[in-house]
């Protein structure tokens, strides 16, 4: 990848700008998912979860949902960051600042990606830190957590860019997140173990890629998971590569970027 | 740098928007150091030509080069050589005008310390230094025009492309911009200007190209084109008879 970067200062500048953008509106980008996670943790994890017999899973229900919430907000934050940044860039036409510059299409995608990954990982770790206010929850496999956070953030940052290129208005922009990404993530086991599902639904869940991604984060945090960790890791890697290449291709052909 | 005497070379450029042909086999050259006025009525193809040159538009056929570099296959090289001052105020709303210039310079590979120095110098030159911590929304339209120029010049491009740079400017700002452009051209920058103000083109430019309905209808040295007539008369004569 390094030899494909001919303008490292430019990529770094674009990355800095993307990170600056979401940190400058942290009350809209960082804190809302932490507040909503705290509510989920208190209501489902503490108030209701303490009355659920979850001993078969080898952990409390609270410790079960924390990785799910981390994964869900990682996915949403990464998607929202790149989709809003790129779409607003198209809307105000300041995307031209990048399109006129000597950044290759890979470099443009990498720069925008940096913001999505940084926001996703910040929120994901923020959710974990928030969970410590209610109960201790250690990280079983820190390297695996880093791997899954990066892969998931890349997948949904790229998905966000594709959504931003496709969308013609703000309604279309949020459509993917509301109707596809969040429902699939919720069905992918944010709040429930796969084994709880009826058999036909369980079979369908194996075709839901979110199940593997949520499971990967859960494995990293607790050491146990619904899907084999190696399979989750491989699926995450393949999806990240596929989404990245597809996004670079769209930039290369100038899909809705060039007239 | 190849073909160093020819800054812009366009050969048989055709561009369609779906079925509408915006450019029809457009061909012309702009020499290094020239001050080139690219004139035409609304919808003639001026901005489309600029967009192709800068990589903002795809095109169906033709050969477009900037100092010998193909704008499609060698876009990383050609874009370094061009600064575009667009018609619209398209600034990032999250950044102050100082940050905006520094980032823009860095996108062109200029190190942060040098980017900051250039941003300060340009803001000073265009009397925007006291607004450096403002966002663009807080600026008047004249200030935004100046900011567009600062942004186009931040990487010290060989070619400055100006798409109606003085539209909507008051007289004082118009003269400030004219003086600055004349000075830049004297220092060796190639300037490619589109404007609806014939007086502006007549006063500043050395070479004139007129496009109408996607075709180049006249191109040449200013004296040769004017032949003791005013540019306005020549322009109306050419575009009116098409």
Image (tube, coloured by chain):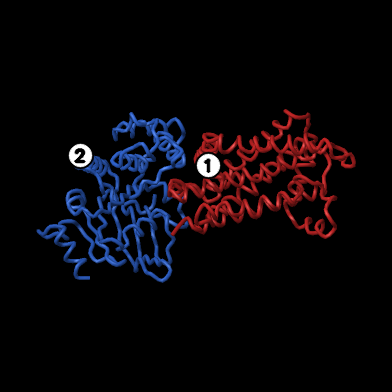
Chain colours: A red, B blue
Most foreground residue, A90 or B148: A90
Nearer to us: label 1 or label 2: 2
Q: Which quarter of the picture shows residue A112?
A: top right
Residue A170 x %, y %: 52, 52
Most foreground residue, B2 or A129: A129
Secondary-structure class at tag 1: helix
Residue at mark 1: A11
Q: Residues within 10 Å of mark 2 (few under 14, many from 20)?
A: few
Q: Is residue A136 left or right of residue B25?
A: right
Q: Residues within 10 Å of mark 1 (few under 14, many from 20)?
A: many
Residue B26 x %, y %: 33, 65
Secondary-structure class at tag 2: helix
Residue located farthest toward the left when viewing the structure as drawn? B228
Q: Is residue A72 left or right of residue B7?
A: right
Q: How far, Cα to Cα, is label 1 from label 2?
A: 39 Å
Residue at mark 2: B172
Q: Is residue B5 left or right of residue A15?
A: left
Please tell me the numbered disc located at residue B25. none
Most foreground residue, A18 or A6: A18
Query: Looking at the image, which residue is at 35% across and 49% down?
Result: B88
Measured along the vertical axis of the image, is residue B234 above or below residue B148? Answer: below
Residue A216 x %, y %: 76, 45
Which chain is disc 1 placed on?
A
Measured along the vertical axis of the image, is residue B163 above or below residue B48? Answer: above
């Amino acid at each position: 990848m390094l030899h494909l970067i001919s303008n490292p200062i430019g990529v770094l500048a674009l990355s800095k700008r993307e990170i600056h953008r979401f940190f400058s509106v942290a009350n809209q980008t960082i804190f809302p998912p932490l507040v909503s996670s705290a509510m989920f943790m208190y209501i489902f994890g503490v108030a209701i979860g303490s009355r659920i017999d979850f001993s078969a899973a080898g952990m409390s229900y609270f410790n079960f949902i924390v990785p799910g919430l981390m994964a869900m907000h990682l996915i949403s934050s990464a998607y929202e960051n790149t989709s809003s940044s790129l779409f607003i860039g198209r809307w105000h036409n300041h995307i031209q600042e990048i399109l006129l510059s000597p950044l290759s299409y890979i470099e443009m995608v990498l720069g925008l990606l940096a913001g999505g990954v940084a926001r996703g990982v910040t929120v994901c770790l923020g959710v974990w830190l928030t969970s410590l206010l209610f109960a201790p929850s250690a990280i079983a496999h820190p390297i695996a957590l880093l791997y899954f956070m990066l892969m998931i953030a890349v997948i949904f940052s790229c998905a966000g860019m594709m959504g931003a290129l496709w969308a013609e208005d703000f309604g279309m922009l949020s459509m993917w997140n509301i109707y596809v990404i969040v429902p699939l993530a919720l069905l992918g086991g944010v709040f429930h173990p796969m084994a709880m599902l009826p058999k036909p639904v369980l079979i369908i869940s194996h075709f839901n890629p979110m199940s593997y991604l949520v499971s990967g984060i859960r494995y990293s945090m607790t050491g146990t998971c619904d899907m084999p960790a190696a399979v989750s890791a491989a699926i995450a890697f393949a999806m990240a590569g596929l989404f990245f290449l597809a996004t670079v291709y769209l930039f290369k052909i100038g899909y809705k970027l060039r007239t | 740098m190849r073909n160093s005497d020819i800054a812009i070379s366009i050969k048989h450029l055709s561009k369609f928007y779906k079925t509408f042909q915006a450019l029809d086999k457009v061909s012309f050259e702009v020499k290094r150091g020239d001050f080139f006025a690219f004139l035409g009525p609304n919808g003639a193809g001026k901005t489309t030509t600029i967009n192709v040159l800068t990589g903002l538009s795809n095109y169906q056929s033709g050969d477009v080069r900037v100092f010998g570099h193909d704008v499609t296959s060698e876009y990383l090289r050609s874009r370094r050589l061009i600064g575009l001052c667009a018609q619209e105020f398209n600034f990032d709303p999250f950044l102050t005008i100082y940050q905006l210039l520094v980032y823009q310079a860095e996108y062109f590979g200029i190190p942060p310390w040098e980017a900051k120095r250039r941003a300060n110098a340009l803001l000073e030159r265009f009397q925007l230094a006291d607004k450096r911590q403002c966002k663009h929304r807080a600026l008047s339209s004249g200030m935004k025009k100046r900011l567009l120029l600062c942004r186009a010049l931040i990487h010290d491009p060989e070619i400055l492309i100006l798409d109606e740079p003085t539209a909507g400017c008051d007289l004082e700002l118009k003269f400030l911009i004219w003086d600055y452009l004349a000075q830049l051209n004297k220092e060796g920058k190639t300037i490619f200007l589109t404007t609806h103000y014939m007086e502006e083109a007549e006063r500043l430019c050395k070479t004139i190209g007129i496009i109408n309905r996607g075709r180049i209808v006249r191109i040449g040295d200013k004296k040769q084109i004017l032949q003791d007539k005013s540019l306005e008369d020549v322009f109306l004569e050419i575009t009116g008879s098409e």
